[in-house]
Image: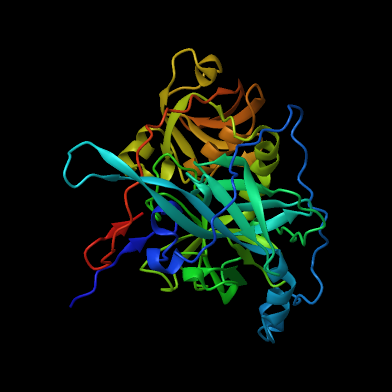
Amino acid sequence: MKSKAILISVLVPVLVTGCGRSKAEKEAEPVLPAGAVPAVASAGPAPTLNNGVPAPLPGALPESKDSRDFVGPRSFAPVAKSADPSVVTIYTHGEEQEPSFFSRGKRGARAAKGLGTGFIVQKDGVIVTNDHVIDGADEILVQLSDERRFPAKIAGRDPRTDIAVIRIEGGKDLPAIALGDSDALDVGDWVVAIGNPFGLSHTVSAGIVSAKGRGRDDVPLDPSGYYSFIQTDASINPGNSGGPLLNLKGEVVGMNSAIRGGGAQGIGFAIPINMVKQILPTLLREGRLTRSALGIRIRDARDLSAEDRAHLKLGDEKGAVVEGVEPNGPADRAKLEVGDLIVAFDGQPTERSALLQWMASTAGVGKTATLRVVRQGKPLDLSVTLGELKEPKRAVRPRAAPRAVDPEGDPFIR
């Protein structure tokens, strides 16, 4: 049979599929305690995230960016040993709706279990994972590497980035992991993944960074999401969701989130840890992320035709082209115009439209930012005060019942 290229996202709701585990495999899981009540901290300025973990961790391997010094890692064991105590298994329990076979429109509830991965970022029990791991969970149970189990509650979540944070009840002096710098990664750098693929707890795999900046066009997930994935050929499978991607210092540089090609095909995707670090303090403080907005509709300048570039008098500039301006919105009040090319946001280059979208949405409501704009071939700076992004209300859809998946017959499975 001729094989087909398929895309399987680890972003499937785990209460539907259990991140790839069958129902029979999960029946033996214990009944979970009550939990998963959103916890919102008191208001105040967002703190700077500091998990108090020194880096590099003991036993981690030295890194060299000079190819002349390359001898390859002697072993990935030091990385695995230093990071593994901070990696946790996340069990979820909830209810899902399934259609009635005999009565159209009527649905019944059935128990659903799920499994994913997370990693401890603060010693008091703060754990980072994917939002889809805990989505719809009524009860959450966290198992540490020493097999101790704790109930946990949701502290904050952001579906658009697929980032969530949970907190262990009664946790203290837990082994928090060091968070690295994903911007410092180069294509070709060694990385190590730790997770629970198909329920095989604390599985370690290794590979390299295959690419950076993979977006919605490369990984067709939720079109309203914010993505800039690290691509890696480290083996990632359903169940790795929410687990750490590590550099050779033992620092987390990404959170494993999606796979392509049926799993273990050398094409996996991780959320950059810098993205996580940027919104985590707000999630811990407020439980959610309130996004700011410019009030414009944009597209990537790379997608313009030669005729359009000539009409706008653009040379080789990269950035975000304004296609629409919201009347009386922040950009309109700042005199931004259709056809303007935004090349920098507060001094930071915006070579891709997705990068401008991320910067503007996380800068903060009420913040005044400077936009570097190219208008008809001439550069100028505009000052704009950001407004609040009005998030569309998402319809609550009942989760479908688990079903057998035929990869050959389903080109895109969520």
Q: Is residue 151 visible?
A: yes
Question: Measured from the top left, where is residue 410 in percent x and y?
Answer: 25, 61
- Side (left or right) of 50 relative to 158: right
Do we see residue 13 in this rendering?
Answer: no
Compared to residue 124, the image places residue 265 above or below, namely: below
Whether residue 67 is situated above or below residue 354 in the rendered picture = below
- Using residue 77 as the reference point, say whether residue 340 is left or right of it: left
Q: How is the image coloured?
A: rainbow
Q: Nearer the viewer, residue 60 or 353?
A: 60
**Left or right, residue 88 beside residue 215:** right
- The residue at the far top in this view is 328
Residue drawn 29% across the image and 59% down it: 403
Residue 335's spot in the image, x, y percent? 52, 17
Q: Position of residue 54 (x, y in %)?
A: 83, 61
The residue at 29%/63% (across/down) is 405
Quadrant where the image shows the C terminus: bottom left
Residue at the image position 35 percent from the left and 40 percent from the top? 398
| Total numbered labels | 0
The one of 37 and 237 positioned closer to us in this rendering: 37
Residue 320: x and y in percent read 47, 37
Q: Nearer the viewer, residue 391 or 157?
A: 157
Q: Residue at x 68, y 75 (%)?
A: 80
Using the image, determine if residue 93 lies above or below residue 78. above
Q: Work out which quarter of the rendered image holds the N terminus and state it.
A: bottom left
